[in-house]
Each structure stands twice: as C-alpha cells, then as structure tokens.
Amino acid sequence: MIPTIEWKNGAVRMLDQSLLPNQVKYIDCRSFERVAQGIKSLKIRGAPAIGIAAAMGIALAAQPIKAKNIFEFKKKMAPVYEAFSKTRPTAVNLFWAIERMKGCVEEAEDLPIGQLKAFLVQASQKMLEEDIQINRAIGRHGNKVIQKKDTILTHCNAGSLATGGYGTALGVIRAAHESKKNIRVFADETRPVLQGGRLTAWELMEDNIDVTLITDNMAGYVMSLGRIDLCIVGADRIARNGDTANKIGTYSVAVLAKQHGIPFYVAAPLSTIDFSLKDGKGIPIEERAPSEVISIFGKILIAPKKVKVFNPAFDVTPARLITGIITEKGIFKPKDLKQLAGD
Ligand code: MRU
C-alpha cells in the first residue's frame, strides 16, 4: 500500500495526488504553511487524510517555536490552528483533528516544552496508525453486506489515498476482495476534479481489483442494465440524523440507486460524524474555483472563459436515501446513528 502521508526526517511527506496517475511524486513539507497549502490545493485530500495532514502540520508548526512557558507556547500555536481551520470547510475530520491536537497540548502541558513538541509528533503519528485500524474495522463490518460476485458502484475516491491507508468505501471493497468474493467495481469519474478516474481507478488497479471507469452521467444507464448490486461511498461530514455530505454527484447516485432499488451505503469513521448538527442543512459546502469546471487542470479551456460557473465541491444526500452507514463500530441505519453520540 503506497503511503499517502507520513512523518519523515522532521518533515511531513505527502504524496502529491494532484499529479496522479501521471506521476508518483512526494513533497516534503518543512513548514506548516506548506502543509496547509497542500490541503487547500488538493495535493492531499479526502476527509480522514485531511485530518491527519492537519495534525502532522500542527506538530510540525510546534517544532521551531521558542517559548519560555506553556502560555507563550499556546499563544504561538493559536494562529496555526486558525490557518488549518481555514483550509477546507466541509470535511469535519479536519476540525476534529485540530481539536484533538489542542487536547494533546492540554494533556501534556506540564511537560518541558521540548518533550511536549515530541509528544505532538507522536500524537499525530498515532492518529495515522489508528485511522488504518479504523478503516480495517470498517472493511470487516462492510464486507458482511457484500455477496460473492457483487458489482459495486463508488463515487469519488474514499480509498487508501483519502485516508491514513486502506480506505473507507474502498476499505470495504478491499476486505471483500481479500476474502475472495470476486467482486467488481464501477468507478464514477467524478467531475470536475476526477478523483474517480485519476485516483480510484489507479488505486484499485494497483491492487488488482477489477475496476471499470464510467463518466458520472453513465451511472443511471449502468444501473438500468442491472449491472450494479450496491453502491458504497465515503463521507466528508455526517449529521446526527444521517444526512451525509460527500463529493458532488453523490446525491445523484443515491437518487438513481433508490429509483433502481439498489442499496446505497456510506462508509466512514466516527470522526466524520458531526453530532452537533441535527441535519444536513447545517453542513458548510465548499465552493471551488471556476477554473476546475471550465478547463482541464487550468490548461485546456472546455467552456467559454467568462461563462458563469457554480462549483460546489460537495452535496448532501438525505438520510432517507441511505441504506446503512458503515463505521468501525458496525453498520447503522441513519436513524440509529444518534446512539453513538454518547449524550
Ligand atoms: O474534495 P475531496 O477530494 O477531498 O473529496 C473527497 C470526498 O468527497 C471523499 O469521498 C470523502 O472525503 C471520503 S474519503 C474517505
């Protein structure tokens, strides 16, 4: 499994996903600003991976800080949290990771500053390792809904690349593949940034999992041919009632699945559930630059340069269209998700 992100020789090393599948190139980020820029510009993307990157970026920012005491240290860290919180608004894992790192500072505030810095590096690495274990658990639970020879439709990339490793939606697919169920995958291309074509197709082919690429507007036809048994997607933020924000186009897939009587599953860790939101209306939806829509990676124009563009990066699938939410704690009907809130 190719690492998406790691702490290496005092730097945050990330795979530049904006170059895939043409180039496999790593960037060594030696400043937290570079990590934040990497998140913003989609060099690293996918909700859990964004959270891990922010945690490592926070640990990185702590290293050069000169502080006489913990109060000074905390004061110098405040703009770092702020910078990461402004990178991308939708994936709640980002804010979850920032809060967790702040909690680590509180937990270790009695340590000498030098040891506190080392503790933050360990904490961010632990987050990465935990994420892989969580994804394996998601895979084990999700595997139960997959029959031998099933064909699964997925949207965007919720794979190893989007997480610490193994993946959420693709984690379920990997688990089914490892248990020799002879599954097949249809990957939506996922306009406009093509995470399905560039990342999911690439990642599954690397693992010898049978994958067929379609453009997003082909999903309904493929379903009407009876070629899809179930859909599994990832999530960027799930509200308490199960409404789920994921990559733009996910909602259309869910509507199509309902129309064709095909089960539609969301696979995500508990860190993607925002129990503070009663439903999906409160989920902030990122809007990105028109250039993503009117050109191919800013190089070839495919629409008039000055055309008005609306480019929301995510949409919200209502809970009523979701068959089940696969987490590391098991599979839940959207209405039962609140059992996990712990309140
Ligand atoms: O804009 P992106 O590429 O960060 O969007 C990613 C997605 O929407 C994924 O499906 C989601 O984050 C789940 S990743 C396990």
Image (cartoon, helix red, strand yellow):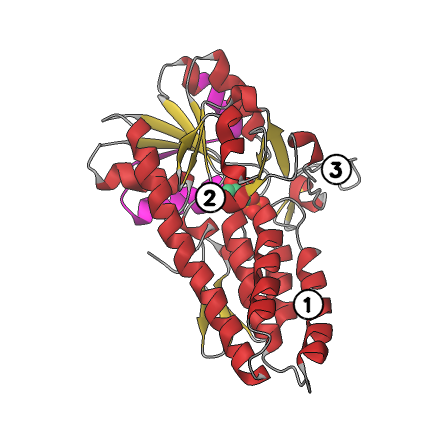
Above or below: residue 111 compared with residue 194: below
Main SS, magenta residues: helix
Which image quadrant: the N terminus? Answer: bottom left
Q: Residue 175 in the image: x percent, y percent?
A: 28, 40
Q: Amino acid at mark 1?
A: Val
What residue is shown at x 42% (from left), y 27% (from top)?
231
Which of discs 3 and 1 lies nearer the camera? The answer is: 1
Which image quadrant: the C terminus? Answer: top right
Q: Which residue is mark 2?
A: 269
Left or right: residue 118 compared with residue 297: left
> How packed is label 2: few (under 14 Cα within 10 Å), some, or many (20 or more)?
many
Rounded to the nearest whole Å, what is the CA distance between mark 2 and mark 1? Answer: 25 Å
Q: Amino acid at mark 2?
A: Pro
What residue is shown at x 72% (from left), y 68% (from top)?
78
Q: Which sits in the foreground, 340 or 206?
A: 340
Q: Which residue is mark 1?
A: 80
> Which residues are the magenta region?
196-221
| Residue 5 circle label | none
What residue is shown at x 60% (from left), y 46% (from top)?
91
> How packed is label 3: few (under 14 Cα within 10 Å), some, or many (20 or more)?
few
Q: Are marks 3 and 1 in contact (CB under 8 Å)?
A: no
Q: Which residue is mark 3?
A: 304
Above or below: residue 136 compared with residue 76: above
Left or right: residue 320 compared with residue 224: right
Q: Secondary structure at mark 3?
A: loop
Rounded to the nearest whole Å, what is the CA distance between mark 3 and mark 2? Answer: 41 Å
What residue is shown at x 49% (from left), y 15% (from top)?
258
